[in-house]
Image (cartoon, grey):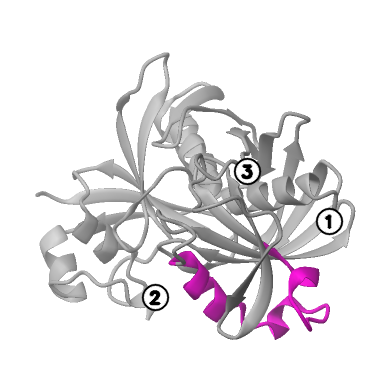
């Protein structure tokens, strides 16, 4: 394998590497690239694939643990920005990740993605059973969880559904809970996890434990999942700002639970990597030290 050329972007601190030349990517290489201290460092790798039909651009989304994600709102926005800026794609385009074709619109200020419809059907998420404010115990704490599918699985926990919680998300051991919930038997394909404080009808504040990545500063699919759950449970309006540590994303939830996500993307750097050197640096296992 020859030199890899990649370009790094972030969406509100949620960072991805777009493969521009070289490859293909495999699980070990994805882990090595994403390793924060011995690799390049990223929350994922975006690997362009061939045309997917109907003019859509094919995409494979690699998580830092070497697994493949069905969908990523921030990853899709970054990929759309890259396609327009670096490959001359039209500003209105379609992208085909494993989770289904989505439409993206790129302008100077932000990227809008039509993320598809949210579902609460356990077979579609997938989840072991219907979960709408279902009471469960996690590390001795009693939580109520809501499962949502937005092309990938999500587990949403509202702050006021945590027994004994106050108003501060960071007072909760949410990282430990997220780690446990990600691999709960309730979610056969594992799950992304969000902890949510409803600040008002149009504002949701979240913390994110991302499947295969751990804590992240922002997540587009997570923002969509919490907006859909809040609408389904009557806790918020259908147009909301979702505040993550990295910044705010705008989400609209249609009456049919069709989701529209909008937010900014920034380019960080162009990177050249020699795979043999990278693998020696990270180690034969390619372990993602960011998750330690």
Task: Please state which of residues 88 and 75 is positioned toward the viewer in this rendering.
Answer: 75
Residue at horizontal 47%, vertical 65%? 182
Q: Position of residue 4 (x, y in %)?
A: 21, 50
Q: Is residue 105 left or right of residue 181?
A: right
Task: Please state which of residues 183 and 116 is positioned toward the viewer in this rendering.
Answer: 183
Read off the residue under disc 2: 291
Residue 216 sits in which quadrant? bottom right
Which mark, residue 203? 1
Alpha-carbon span between mark 3 and mark 1: 22 Å
Residue at horizontal 52%, vertical 45%? 125
Q: Which secondary structure lies at badge 3?
A: loop
Q: How many C-alpha atoms fall within 10 Å of the one at disc 3: few (<14), some, or many (≥20)?
A: many
Mark in front: 3 vs 2: 3
Q: Earlier in the sequence, mark 3 or mark 2?
A: 3
Alpha-carbon span between mark 2 and mark 1: 30 Å
Residue at horizontal 48%, vertical 47%? 126
Q: Where are the magenta residues, as a range?
A: 157-183
Task: Please state which of residues 285 and 130 is positioned toward the viewer in this rendering.
Answer: 130
Q: Is residue 209 left or right of residue 143?
A: left
Circles 3 and 1, Cβ within 8 Å, touching? The answer is no
Residue 25 drawn above or below residue 285: above
Q: How many C-alpha atoms fall within 10 Å of the one at disc 1: few (<14), some, or many (≥20)?
A: some
Q: Position of residue 160 (x, y in %)?
A: 80, 70
């Amino acid at each position: 394998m020859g030199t890899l050329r990649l370009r790094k972007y972030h969406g509100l601190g949620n960072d991805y590497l777009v493969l521009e030349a070289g490859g293909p990517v495999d699980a070990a290489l994805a882990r090595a690239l994403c390793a924060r201290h011995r690799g390049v460092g990223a929350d994922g790798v975006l690997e362009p694939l061939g045309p997917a039909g109907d003019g859509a651009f094919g995409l494979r989304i690699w998580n830092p643990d070497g697994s493949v994600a069905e969908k990523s709102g921030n990853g899709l926005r970054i990929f759309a920005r890259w396609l327009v800026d670096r490959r001359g794609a039209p500003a209105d385009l379609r992208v085909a990740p494993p989770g289904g074709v989505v439409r993206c619109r790129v302008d100077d200020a932000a990227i809008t993605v039509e993320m598809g419809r949210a579902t609460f059907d356990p077979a579609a998420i997938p989840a072991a059973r219907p979960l709408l404010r279902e009471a469960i115990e996690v590390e001795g704490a009693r939580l109520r969880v809501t499962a949502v599918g937005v092309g990938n699985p999500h587990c949403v926990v509202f702050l006021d559904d945590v027994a004994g919680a106050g108003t501060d998300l960071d007072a909760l051991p949410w990282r430990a809970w997220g780690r446990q919930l990600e691999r709960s038997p309730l979610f056969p394909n594992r799950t992304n996890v969000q902890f949510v404080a409803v600040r008002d009808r149009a504002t949701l504040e979240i913390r994110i434990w991302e499947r295969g990545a751990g804590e992240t500063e922002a997540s587009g699919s997570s923002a969509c999942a919490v907006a859909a759950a809040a609408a389904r449970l009557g806790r918020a309006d259908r147009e909301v700002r979702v505040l993550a540590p990295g910044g705010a994303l705008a989400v609209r939830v249609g009456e049919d639970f069709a989701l529209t996500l909008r937010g900014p993307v920034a380019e960080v750097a162009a990177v050249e990597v020699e795979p043999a050197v990278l693998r020696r640096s990270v180690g034969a296992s390619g372990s993602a030290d960011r998750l330690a």
